């Protein structure tokens, strides 16, 4: 939805401001960053928000981005050219990136409660095998959600709580 896309850009902007307020440099692979940044600039120019965030070390990933742009962002994470990635739930759709921490800003997607399946899928993106030894999930919740509700739904969930996803096979 457009509000989700707007939220991704708002959070990317917030991260950039926080990074700029730090007194220290963010450790990245500068050669890779320059290479990918140059490709991105050739494709979209240097006035687009996605480019400006990339320059500051923040990747923006959404399903409606052209494949080549998403690939540059993903390569930036894989090659340590970017340290932060702000994404819609496209992250849960089988993208294997070396992410140590996943921050879920609220337990909702499109105004609906975050499903157990999506929560576990996002959780599975943190601490990828052969990349990290462990991962962490940070779920940020407003007062709208009680601590008991969140613990019962997400922290104490088990595999049999996951809703089955049935996809018809078309011939």
Image: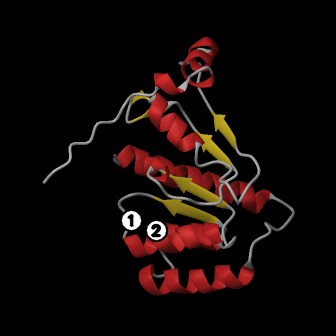
Q: Secondary structure at mark 1?
A: loop
Query: In the rendering, at what x and y percent does residue 122 appear?
Result: 54, 43
Mark 2 or 1, nearer chain start = 1
The residue pinned by badge 2 equals 70
**How much space separates mark 2 and mark 1, taking CA atoms?**
6 Å
Residue drawn 48% across and 72% down?
Answer: 71
Q: How many marks?
A: 2
In the image, which disc is placed on residue 11?
Answer: none
Q: Quadrant of the C terminus?
A: bottom left
Q: Residues within 10 Å of mark 1 (few under 14, many from 20)?
A: few
Name, please, the residue furthest toward the right: 23
- Toward the viewer: 21 or 89? 89
Q: Position of residue 37 (x, y in %)?
A: 58, 81
Q: Which element type, helix, strand or loop, lies under badge 2?
A: helix
Tell me the quarter of the picture where residue 102 sits. top right
Residue at the disc numbered 1: 65
Can I make out residue 114 in this image?
no
User: In this view of the protein, which residue sits in the foreground, 38 or 149?
Assistant: 149
Q: Is residue 63 visible?
A: yes
Residue 125 position, x and y percent, is 59, 49
Q: What residue is rendered at 56% in x and 22% in y?
A: 157
With 23 as the anchor, is 169 left or right in this view? left
Q: Is residue 116 left or right of residue 20?
A: left
Taking the image as shown, residue 113 lies to the left or right of residue 18, namely: left
Q: Residue at x 43, y 57 (%)?
A: 62
The outermost residue toward the left is 171
Question: From the viewer's perspective, is residue 1 above or below residue 71?
Answer: above
- The colouring scheme, among rainbow, by chain, secondary structure or one colour, is secondary structure
Residue drawn at 51 percent across, 53 percent down: 87
Asked if the residue at tag 1 contacts the one at tag 2, i.e. Cβ–Cβ closer than 8 Å, the answer is yes
Q: Residues within 10 Å of mark 2 (few under 14, many from 20)?
A: some
């Amino acid at each position: 939805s457009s509000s989700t896309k707007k939220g991704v850009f708002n959070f990317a902007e917030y991260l950039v401001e926080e990074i700029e307020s730090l007194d220290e440099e963010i450790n990245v692979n500068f050669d890779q960053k320059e290479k990918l940044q140059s490709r991105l600039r050739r494709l979209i120019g240097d006035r687009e928000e996605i480019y400006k965030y990339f320059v500051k070390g923040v990747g923006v990933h959404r399903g409606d981005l052209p494949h080549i742009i998403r690939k540059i962002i993903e390569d930036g994470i894989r090659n340590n050219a970017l340290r932060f990635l702000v994404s819609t739930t496209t992250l849960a759709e089988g993208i294997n990136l070396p992410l140590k921490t996943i921050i879920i800003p609220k337990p909702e997607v499109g105004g609906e409660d975050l499903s157990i399946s999506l929560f576990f899928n996002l959780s599975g993106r943190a601490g990828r095998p052969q990349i990290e030894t462990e991962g962490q999930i940070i779920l940020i919740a407003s007062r709208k959600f009680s601590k008991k509700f969140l613990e019962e739904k997400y922290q104490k969930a088990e595999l049999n709580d996951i809703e089955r996803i049935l996809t018809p096979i078309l011939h």
